[in-house]
Image (cartoon, coloured by chain):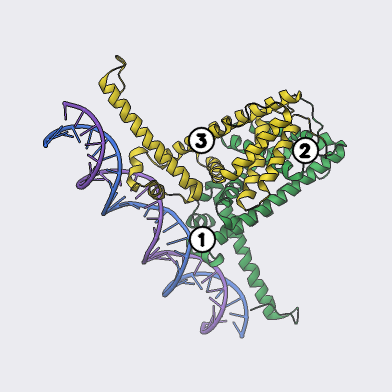
Chain colours: A green, B yellow, C blue, D purple
DNA sequence: AGAAAATCTTGACACTCGTCCAAAATCGTT
DNA sequence: AACGATTTTGGACGAGTGTCAAGATTTTCT
């Protein structure tokens, strides 16, 4: 039944809405459990049964809330983005000097490298899957774009504070930060204790580099 | 039977050697077929039967030449490296000026982006798998290191020609180039016709950036 | 040519997978 | 309490997986 447009206080309307809410609430719950399992095992080794079990449900329930596996994974990727941008939104919105901004941003990246390592791992896994499975590409590209905007805000603010305009476009800047983060993640997950610290210094250096305010080695 | 150390002309020695050669030759052949299939389907969707079929053998033969699936994949990754460094070794060893070097290197990267897209796709897939499967990490890290050395040669040569030392370490430089290449690959495989051209300009710009010889935007 | 060693095929095994569905359980309303 | 709708269960299905071993085939050596 589609939602009535006549009266806002319509009873059937309230019921339908409540059902929709419950439905999508459980969808989110299951997707979060799926994200948890995916981040632990990776895309290639995660089964629907494993996800349902970790969520405390039987395996059949997933097809009640999701059309098929691709539908579930796609929803998970979108959910990941929500978590992701929220995490970065808390990071560095105000900083007095360029140096302080670089410092705080670098610390934040190093922190999420350690704390959310398995989630980032999942992101890179899914982005790789998008190279093969066309179904994922739209969502992956959208998340990439939102991360790029995040980098763009940081870089342009830094450039403003430093009084020196960026030497490259935001796409390139994002790709660069993404590259060093990915490298740091592999080191972190391999147990390299210096991974976070090295990322911190690399990020700070990089901000100087992309604004052309760095010193030669 | 282990190889005799007494006489170089030993007959049993010759036989053993020939057998070893044939054995490892077929191993390589099967691994190449596996690489072909892997690059098309990706790690998650490639089965041993599929590989064997594409190689023109029955599925049982793989366990004659490889201990198990991990053994095969690991061997494939190593093989990929051999192909990879060979490809890059042909690239830009001599260039008169910094500008020319940047130009040639950028063209070469853009070319391999188009021609060997599916192979690069496999590389990023396997590197992501290494984040989950510990068995792959050693090989992946080794390949990463060899690619880093390649970047290091290019950057340091460029810096020499430009008369301006690099503004960051080789690890960061490699991560940056890797990042933009990965981004370009996603665009290329998504059918973006401007992917290669944009990569070419980005690579050339980047060489200037890492040596601090670039102009502000 | 015949024996021995290698290579390869074939079928089977014990799983796991995604998907579907009928029945059971739970919930909300009357 | 009782009914209808929603939600959940758990089994079944067919397809596909990696692995293994026994037998057929081919190659190699004497």
Residue B25 x, y percent position in the rendering: 38, 34
Question: Which chain letter goes with mark 2?
Answer: A
A75, above or below B13, in the image: below
Q: Are the residues under marks 1 and 2 on the same chain?
A: yes
x, y percent for residue B171: 65, 30
Left or right, A41 with respect to B3, comes to right
The N terminus of chain B - image quarter: top left
Q: Nearer the viewer, residue B90 or B79?
A: B90
- Disc 3 to disc 1, how far (Cα)? 47 Å
- Residue on which the image places disc 2: A104
Asked if labels 2 and 1 touch by Cβ distance under 8 angstroms, the answer is no
Q: Is residue A127 visible?
A: yes
The C terminus of chain B - image quarter: top right
Q: Which residue is mark 1?
A: A57
Question: Which residue is pictured at 81% across the width and 39% down the height?
Answer: A166
Query: Which residue is farthest front?
Result: B96
Rendering coords of residue A59 (x, y %): 48, 61
First in residue order: circle 1 vs circle 2? 1
Which residue matches tag 3?
B83
Q: Nearer the viewer, mark 1 or mark 2?
A: 2
Q: Are marks 3 and 1 on the same chain?
A: no
Choose mark 2 or mark 3, whichever is in front.
3
| Left or right: A17, with C15 as reference point | right
In front: B154, or B143? B154
Q: How far apart are the two marked residues, 1 and 2, measured between alpha carbons?
A: 42 Å
Q: Chain of mark 1?
A: A
Distance CA(mark 2)–CA(mark 3):
42 Å
């Amino acid at each position: 039944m589609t939602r009535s447009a006549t009266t806002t206080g319509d009873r059937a309307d309230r019921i339908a809405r409540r059902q929709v809410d419950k439905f999508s609430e459980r969808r989110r719950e299951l997707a979060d459990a799926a994200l948890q399992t995916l981040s632990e095992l990776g895309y290639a080794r995660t089964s629907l049964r494993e996800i349902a079990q970790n969520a405390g449900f039987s395996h059949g329930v997933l097809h009640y809330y999701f059309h098929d596996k691709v539908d579930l994974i796609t929803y998970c990727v979108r959910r990941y983005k929500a978590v992701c941008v929220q995490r970065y939104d808390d990071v560095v919105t105000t900083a007095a000097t360029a140096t302080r901004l670089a410092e705080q941003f670098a610390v934040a990246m190093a922190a999420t490298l350690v704390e959310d390592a398995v989630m980032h791992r999942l992101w890179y896994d899914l982005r790789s899957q998008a190279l093969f499975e066309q179904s994922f590409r739209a969502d992956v590209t959208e998340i990439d774009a939102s991360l790029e905007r995040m980098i763009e805000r940081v870089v342009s603010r830094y450039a403003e504070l430093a009084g020196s305009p960026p030497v490259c476009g935001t796409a390139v800047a994002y790709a660069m930060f993404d590259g060093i983060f990915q490298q740091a993640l592999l080191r972190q997950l391999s147990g390299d204790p210096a991974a976070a610290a090295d990322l911190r210094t690399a990020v700070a250096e990089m901000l100087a580099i992309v604004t052309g305010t760095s010193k030669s080695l």
